[in-house]
Amino acid sequence: MKQLLLFFLLSISAVAQKSFLVKDSSTNEPIAYTSIFTEKGTFKVNAEPDGSFIIPNEFLHEVFVFDAVGYEQKQQILTDIVLLETKSEVLDEVVIVPRLGIKEIKVGKIDKKKIKLSVYDYTQKVAPLLASKFSLSNDKCRFIKEVRVKVYSEKDHTKFALKVYSTGENGEPNELLNDEPIYCDVNKGYTISKIDLEDFNIKIDNNSFFIAVENLNIKNNVFQVENEGKLMNFFSPSICLSKSEFDTSWYGHLVNEKIKWIKQKYYEEYIKENKGYPNFQIEVTLTN
Protein backbone atom coordinates (compact mmCIF):
# COMPACT_ATOMS: atom_id res chain seq x y z
CA MET A 1 0.00 0.00 0.00
CA LYS A 2 1.44 3.30 -1.04
CA GLN A 3 1.44 6.27 1.26
CA LEU A 4 2.78 9.79 0.99
CA LEU A 5 3.84 11.67 4.11
CA LEU A 6 3.94 15.41 4.70
CA PHE A 7 6.79 16.17 7.10
CA PHE A 8 7.23 19.02 9.54
CA LEU A 9 10.57 18.71 11.37
CA LEU A 10 10.27 20.61 14.60
CA SER A 11 11.94 20.53 18.00
CA ILE A 12 10.59 18.22 20.70
CA SER A 13 8.09 19.99 22.95
CA ALA A 14 7.94 19.82 26.73
CA VAL A 15 5.78 17.16 28.36
CA ALA A 16 4.43 19.54 31.03
CA GLN A 17 1.17 21.16 29.97
CA LYS A 18 -1.98 22.94 31.18
CA SER A 19 -5.66 22.64 30.28
CA PHE A 20 -8.01 25.50 29.31
CA LEU A 21 -11.58 26.02 28.03
CA VAL A 22 -13.07 28.06 25.17
CA LYS A 23 -16.75 29.06 25.40
CA ASP A 24 -19.46 31.21 23.82
CA SER A 25 -19.62 34.53 25.69
CA SER A 26 -23.43 34.68 25.48
CA THR A 27 -24.48 31.08 26.13
CA ASN A 28 -21.46 29.83 28.10
CA GLU A 29 -21.56 26.74 25.86
CA PRO A 30 -18.26 25.14 24.77
CA ILE A 31 -17.08 25.87 21.22
CA ALA A 32 -15.88 22.53 19.86
CA TYR A 33 -12.91 22.28 17.48
CA THR A 34 -11.91 25.96 17.76
CA SER A 35 -8.53 26.56 16.10
CA ILE A 36 -6.09 27.82 18.72
CA PHE A 37 -2.63 28.89 17.66
CA THR A 38 0.21 31.15 18.72
CA GLU A 39 0.42 34.65 17.26
CA LYS A 40 3.72 33.60 15.66
CA GLY A 41 2.18 30.48 14.11
CA THR A 42 4.57 28.08 15.86
CA PHE A 43 1.95 25.92 17.60
CA LYS A 44 -1.66 24.94 16.80
CA VAL A 45 -4.24 22.81 18.53
CA ASN A 46 -8.01 22.37 18.26
CA ALA A 47 -10.47 22.40 21.13
CA GLU A 48 -12.01 19.04 22.04
CA PRO A 49 -15.82 18.54 21.77
CA ASP A 50 -16.18 19.84 25.35
CA GLY A 51 -14.25 23.03 24.51
CA SER A 52 -11.13 21.99 26.42
CA PHE A 53 -7.62 22.30 25.00
CA ILE A 54 -4.13 21.63 26.30
CA ILE A 55 -1.10 23.89 25.85
CA PRO A 56 2.49 22.77 26.57
CA ASN A 57 4.25 24.86 29.21
CA GLU A 58 6.73 26.27 26.69
CA PHE A 59 3.92 28.26 25.03
CA LEU A 60 1.95 29.38 28.09
CA HIS A 61 3.19 32.99 28.04
CA GLU A 62 2.62 33.62 24.32
CA VAL A 63 -0.27 35.48 22.72
CA PHE A 64 -2.79 33.06 21.19
CA VAL A 65 -5.28 33.46 18.36
CA PHE A 66 -8.73 31.85 18.73
CA ASP A 67 -10.50 31.20 15.44
CA ALA A 68 -13.91 29.53 15.09
CA VAL A 69 -16.32 29.78 12.16
CA GLY A 70 -19.17 32.11 13.08
CA TYR A 71 -17.20 33.87 15.83
CA GLU A 72 -15.04 36.97 15.95
CA GLN A 73 -11.37 36.05 15.90
CA LYS A 74 -9.69 36.88 19.20
CA GLN A 75 -6.08 37.38 20.29
CA GLN A 76 -5.11 37.22 23.94
CA ILE A 77 -2.86 35.80 26.63
CA LEU A 78 -4.21 32.49 27.94
CA THR A 79 -6.77 32.51 30.75
CA ASP A 80 -8.52 29.49 32.31
CA ILE A 81 -11.65 30.23 30.25
CA VAL A 82 -11.52 32.08 26.93
CA LEU A 83 -14.79 33.65 25.77
CA LEU A 84 -15.59 34.28 22.10
CA GLU A 85 -18.30 36.53 20.69
CA THR A 86 -20.51 35.53 17.77
CA LYS A 87 -19.70 37.33 14.53
CA SER A 88 -21.92 40.21 13.55
CA GLU A 89 -21.64 41.53 10.00
CA VAL A 90 -23.44 44.58 8.61
CA LEU A 91 -24.43 44.12 4.96
CA ASP A 92 -25.14 47.13 2.73
CA GLU A 93 -27.56 45.20 0.55
CA VAL A 94 -28.93 41.68 0.55
CA VAL A 95 -29.75 40.18 -2.84
CA ILE A 96 -31.81 36.99 -2.69
CA VAL A 97 -31.07 34.59 -5.55
CA PRO A 98 -33.57 31.72 -5.85
CA ARG A 99 -32.10 28.22 -5.94
CA LEU A 100 -33.91 26.02 -8.44
CA GLY A 101 -32.13 22.69 -7.99
CA ILE A 102 -33.13 21.45 -11.45
CA LYS A 103 -29.71 21.02 -13.08
CA GLU A 104 -26.51 19.55 -11.64
CA ILE A 105 -22.86 19.38 -12.62
CA LYS A 106 -19.93 17.64 -10.97
CA VAL A 107 -16.31 18.81 -10.73
CA GLY A 108 -13.38 16.82 -9.39
CA LYS A 109 -13.37 13.04 -9.09
CA ILE A 110 -13.30 10.05 -6.76
CA ASP A 111 -11.55 6.92 -8.04
CA LYS A 112 -10.29 3.55 -6.79
CA LYS A 113 -6.73 4.62 -6.05
CA LYS A 114 -5.62 4.11 -2.44
CA ILE A 115 -2.64 6.42 -2.24
CA LYS A 116 -3.12 8.59 0.81
CA LEU A 117 -1.54 11.73 2.19
CA SER A 118 -0.80 11.54 5.90
CA VAL A 119 0.00 14.66 7.84
CA TYR A 120 2.93 14.14 10.19
CA ASP A 121 4.16 16.44 12.90
CA TYR A 122 6.69 15.06 15.36
CA THR A 123 5.63 17.49 18.08
CA GLN A 124 1.92 17.88 17.18
CA LYS A 125 2.59 21.59 16.64
CA VAL A 126 1.11 22.66 13.31
CA ALA A 127 -0.85 20.77 10.64
CA PRO A 128 -1.70 22.39 7.29
CA LEU A 129 -4.95 22.91 5.44
CA LEU A 130 -5.12 20.88 2.23
CA ALA A 131 -7.13 22.51 -0.57
CA SER A 132 -8.18 21.65 -4.12
CA LYS A 133 -9.07 24.27 -6.70
CA PHE A 134 -12.11 23.80 -8.93
CA SER A 135 -12.89 25.75 -12.09
CA LEU A 136 -16.40 26.43 -13.36
CA SER A 137 -17.54 26.83 -16.97
CA ASN A 138 -21.27 26.53 -16.28
CA ASP A 139 -22.80 29.91 -15.43
CA LYS A 140 -26.07 28.41 -14.16
CA CYS A 141 -24.93 25.79 -11.62
CA ARG A 142 -23.42 27.96 -8.86
CA PHE A 143 -24.76 26.51 -5.60
CA ILE A 144 -22.76 23.78 -3.83
CA LYS A 145 -25.05 20.82 -3.16
CA GLU A 146 -22.68 18.10 -1.98
CA VAL A 147 -18.99 17.45 -1.41
CA ARG A 148 -17.47 13.96 -1.43
CA VAL A 149 -13.99 13.35 -0.03
CA LYS A 150 -12.16 10.03 -0.09
CA VAL A 151 -10.22 9.51 3.14
CA TYR A 152 -8.48 6.84 5.20
CA SER A 153 -8.65 6.65 8.98
CA GLU A 154 -6.67 4.52 11.41
CA LYS A 155 -9.63 4.35 13.83
CA ASP A 156 -13.33 5.13 14.18
CA HIS A 157 -14.85 8.56 14.78
CA THR A 158 -11.99 10.76 13.68
CA LYS A 159 -12.97 14.18 12.36
CA PHE A 160 -11.94 16.82 9.86
CA ALA A 161 -13.25 20.29 9.12
CA LEU A 162 -14.39 21.20 5.62
CA LYS A 163 -13.99 24.79 4.39
CA VAL A 164 -15.02 26.54 1.18
CA TYR A 165 -12.93 29.46 -0.09
CA SER A 166 -13.24 31.96 -2.89
CA THR A 167 -10.28 32.58 -5.23
CA GLY A 168 -7.89 35.49 -4.63
CA GLU A 169 -6.10 37.75 -7.08
CA ASN A 170 -3.11 35.40 -7.35
CA GLY A 171 -5.23 32.28 -7.76
CA GLU A 172 -4.93 31.29 -4.08
CA PRO A 173 -7.70 30.52 -1.55
CA ASN A 174 -9.05 33.78 -0.23
CA GLU A 175 -12.36 34.48 1.56
CA LEU A 176 -14.07 31.78 3.64
CA LEU A 177 -17.53 31.23 2.10
CA ASN A 178 -19.19 29.07 4.76
CA ASP A 179 -20.38 31.12 7.73
CA GLU A 180 -21.16 27.99 9.78
CA PRO A 181 -18.71 25.23 10.76
CA ILE A 182 -18.69 22.01 8.73
CA TYR A 183 -17.30 18.94 10.52
CA CYS A 184 -17.17 15.38 9.19
CA ASP A 185 -17.08 12.16 11.20
CA VAL A 186 -14.98 9.36 9.68
CA ASN A 187 -14.92 5.63 10.45
CA LYS A 188 -11.91 3.32 10.24
CA GLY A 189 -10.52 2.32 6.86
CA TYR A 190 -11.07 3.77 3.38
CA THR A 191 -14.34 5.65 3.16
CA ILE A 192 -15.97 8.37 1.08
CA SER A 193 -17.28 11.18 3.26
CA LYS A 194 -20.45 12.69 1.78
CA ILE A 195 -21.19 16.18 3.08
CA ASP A 196 -24.58 17.69 2.25
CA LEU A 197 -24.18 21.46 1.87
CA GLU A 198 -27.61 22.37 0.46
CA ASP A 199 -28.75 24.08 3.65
CA PHE A 200 -25.58 26.21 3.77
CA ASN A 201 -26.62 28.07 0.58
CA ILE A 202 -23.03 28.55 -0.58
CA LYS A 203 -23.04 30.31 -3.94
CA ILE A 204 -19.94 30.58 -6.13
CA ASP A 205 -19.75 34.01 -7.76
CA ASN A 206 -16.47 33.64 -9.66
CA ASN A 207 -15.10 31.08 -12.11
CA SER A 208 -13.23 29.07 -9.49
CA PHE A 209 -13.33 28.12 -5.82
CA PHE A 210 -11.55 25.89 -3.29
CA ILE A 211 -12.57 23.01 -1.05
CA ALA A 212 -10.18 22.65 1.89
CA VAL A 213 -9.73 19.88 4.45
CA GLU A 214 -8.44 21.00 7.85
CA ASN A 215 -6.72 18.41 10.00
CA LEU A 216 -7.91 18.78 13.59
CA ASN A 217 -5.35 18.36 16.36
CA ILE A 218 -7.64 16.61 18.84
CA LYS A 219 -6.97 13.50 20.93
CA ASN A 220 -8.94 11.00 18.90
CA ASN A 221 -7.34 12.09 15.61
CA VAL A 222 -3.75 11.40 16.70
CA PHE A 223 -2.10 8.00 16.27
CA GLN A 224 1.54 7.02 16.68
CA VAL A 225 3.94 5.12 14.44
CA GLU A 226 7.42 4.00 15.47
CA ASN A 227 10.19 4.95 13.07
CA GLU A 228 13.86 4.31 13.84
CA GLY A 229 13.12 4.00 17.54
CA LYS A 230 11.09 7.23 17.71
CA LEU A 231 7.35 7.62 18.06
CA MET A 232 5.91 9.94 15.43
CA ASN A 233 2.45 11.46 15.69
CA PHE A 234 0.14 11.37 12.67
CA PHE A 235 -3.28 12.94 12.20
CA SER A 236 -6.25 10.91 10.96
CA PRO A 237 -8.01 10.95 8.65
CA SER A 238 -5.65 10.96 5.68
CA ILE A 239 -6.91 12.40 2.42
CA CYS A 240 -6.58 10.16 -0.65
CA LEU A 241 -4.79 11.17 -3.83
CA SER A 242 -5.09 10.40 -7.53
CA LYS A 243 -3.08 11.32 -10.60
CA SER A 244 -3.99 14.40 -12.63
CA GLU A 245 -2.44 16.29 -15.51
CA PHE A 246 -3.20 19.53 -13.65
CA ASP A 247 -1.72 20.68 -10.36
CA THR A 248 -4.69 21.97 -8.34
CA SER A 249 -3.40 21.32 -4.81
CA TRP A 250 -2.66 24.12 -2.34
CA TYR A 251 -1.29 23.97 1.20
CA GLY A 252 -2.23 26.43 3.94
CA HIS A 253 0.41 27.12 6.60
CA LEU A 254 0.31 29.40 9.60
CA VAL A 255 2.59 32.40 9.16
CA ASN A 256 2.29 34.66 12.19
CA GLU A 257 -1.46 34.79 12.93
CA LYS A 258 -2.64 34.23 9.33
CA ILE A 259 -2.80 31.38 6.85
CA LYS A 260 -0.35 31.57 3.97
CA TRP A 261 -1.25 29.51 0.92
CA ILE A 262 1.47 27.95 -1.22
CA LYS A 263 1.83 25.52 -4.10
CA GLN A 264 4.77 23.39 -3.04
CA LYS A 265 5.99 20.31 -4.88
CA TYR A 266 6.46 17.77 -2.09
CA TYR A 267 6.18 14.82 -4.43
CA GLU A 268 8.83 15.03 -7.13
CA GLU A 269 9.25 11.23 -7.06
CA TYR A 270 5.51 10.68 -7.54
CA ILE A 271 5.38 13.16 -10.42
CA LYS A 272 8.36 11.51 -12.14
CA GLU A 273 7.01 7.97 -11.76
CA ASN A 274 3.39 8.69 -12.62
CA LYS A 275 3.84 11.52 -15.12
CA GLY A 276 1.15 13.54 -13.37
CA TYR A 277 0.34 15.49 -10.23
CA PRO A 278 -1.04 13.92 -7.03
CA ASN A 279 -4.31 15.76 -6.46
CA PHE A 280 -6.81 15.29 -3.66
CA GLN A 281 -9.78 13.00 -4.27
CA ILE A 282 -12.59 15.52 -3.85
CA GLU A 283 -15.77 15.68 -5.92
CA VAL A 284 -18.22 18.60 -5.77
CA THR A 285 -21.84 18.58 -6.99
CA LEU A 286 -23.23 21.99 -7.93
CA THR A 287 -26.79 22.90 -8.80
CA ASN A 288 -28.67 25.88 -10.22
Image (cartoon, rainbow, N blue to C red):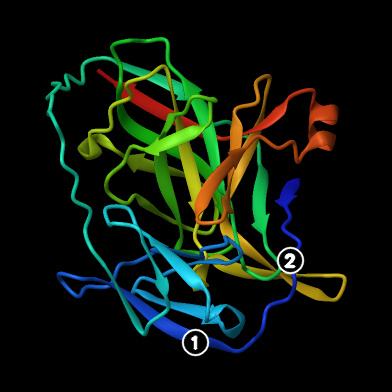
Relative height, residue 279 to residue 21 (above, below): above
Of labels 2 and 1, earlier in sequence is 2
Q: Which residue is mark 1?
A: 18
Q: Which label number is shown at residue 10?
A: 2
Residue 58 left/right relative to 21: right
- Between residue 67 and residue 2, name the one nearer to us: 67
Q: Residue furthest right?
A: 228
Kindly identify the residue that appears in the image at 76 percent across and 62 percent down: 9
Q: Is residue 233 left or right of residue 98?
A: right
Q: Is residue 69 placed above or below 94 in the rendered structure?
A: below
Tag 1's secondary structure? strand
Q: Secondary structure at mark 2?
A: loop
Quadrant placement of the C terminus:
top left
User: In this rendering, does residue 1 appear at all?
Assistant: no
Q: Residue at x 15, y 71 (%)?
A: 27
Nearer to us in this view, 90 or 101 = 90
Marks 2,1: beta carbons within 8 A? no
Residue 174 quadrant: top left
**Can you give x and y, in whole percent of width and height, for residue 218 in the image?**
49, 69
Q: Is residue 193 above or below residue 17?
A: above
Tell which of 186 and 264 is nearer to you: 264
Position of residue 234 measured from the top left corner of the image (x, y, whole percent): 65, 63
The kind of residue on which mark 1 rests is Lys
